[in-house]
């Protein structure tokens, strides 16, 4: 696996990875792909790279991009303030549980720290097994909502 920055010609992949990042509880029907065009979700990828706070790392295996972790400052589900980037991460299903997500997250945390950010936030459904990954990387629950957490990692 190689970790590298997202290239301009790959920005369209963020739509696929956003869709892959949507948590679907066990036994529930997957969302229609059209859900990613709703304004509360399209903000994760629209004009990505146009803002100074846009950062993205991809994981590549056998010349195929299989995962992405990206951040931007936006008023999304994980928003805590206008100085803290929100993080999204996704891997194609067959690449989950192999350590790629952990490696991508660690690299992104390094990049954000080097750029001078003080913290990073994310939103995650409580039932999502990724909560354990985030906790293992030092994320702490800032806000405990009905079925989700807003978590923050100090940098």
Image: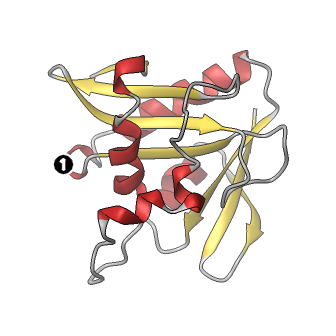
- Quick check: 104 above or below 7? below
Q: Position of residue 140 (x, y in %)?
A: 71, 55
The residue located at (72%, 40%) in the rendering is 73
The residue under the point 27% across, 80% down is 29
Question: What's the residue at 48%, 74% (across, down)?
Answer: 127
Residue 58: where, in percent of width, then height? 39, 27
**Which residue carries the number 1 mark?**
94
Work out whether 93 lies above or below 95.
below
Vertical order, 11 against 20 (above or below): above
For label 1, the SS is helix
Left or right position of 13 against 48: left
Residue at image point 30% right, 83% down: 28
- Res 22 → quadrant: bottom left
Quadrant occupied by the C terminus: top right
Which quarter of the figure has residue 51? top right
Q: Is residue 44 left or right of residue 153?
A: left
């Amino acid at each position: 696996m190689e970790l590298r920055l997202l290239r301009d010609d790959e920005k369209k992949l963020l739509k696929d990875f956003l869709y892959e990042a949507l948590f679907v509880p066990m036994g529930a029907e997957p969302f229609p792909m059209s859900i990613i065009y709703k304004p509360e979700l399209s903000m994760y990828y629209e004009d990505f790279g146009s803002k100074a706070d846009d950062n993205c790392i991809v994981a590549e295996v056998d010349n195929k991009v299989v995962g992405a972790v990206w951040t931007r400052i936006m008023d999304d589900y994980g928003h805590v303030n206008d100085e803290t980037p929100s993080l999204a991460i996704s891997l194609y299903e067959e690449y989950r549980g192999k350590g790629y997500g952990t490696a991508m997250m660690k690299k992104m945390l390094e990049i954000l720290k080097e750029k001078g950010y003080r913290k990073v936030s994310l939103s995650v459904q409580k039932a999502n097994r990724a909560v354990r990954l985030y906790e293992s990387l030092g994320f702490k629950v800032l806000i405990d909502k009905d079925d989700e957490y807003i978590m923050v990692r100090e940098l």
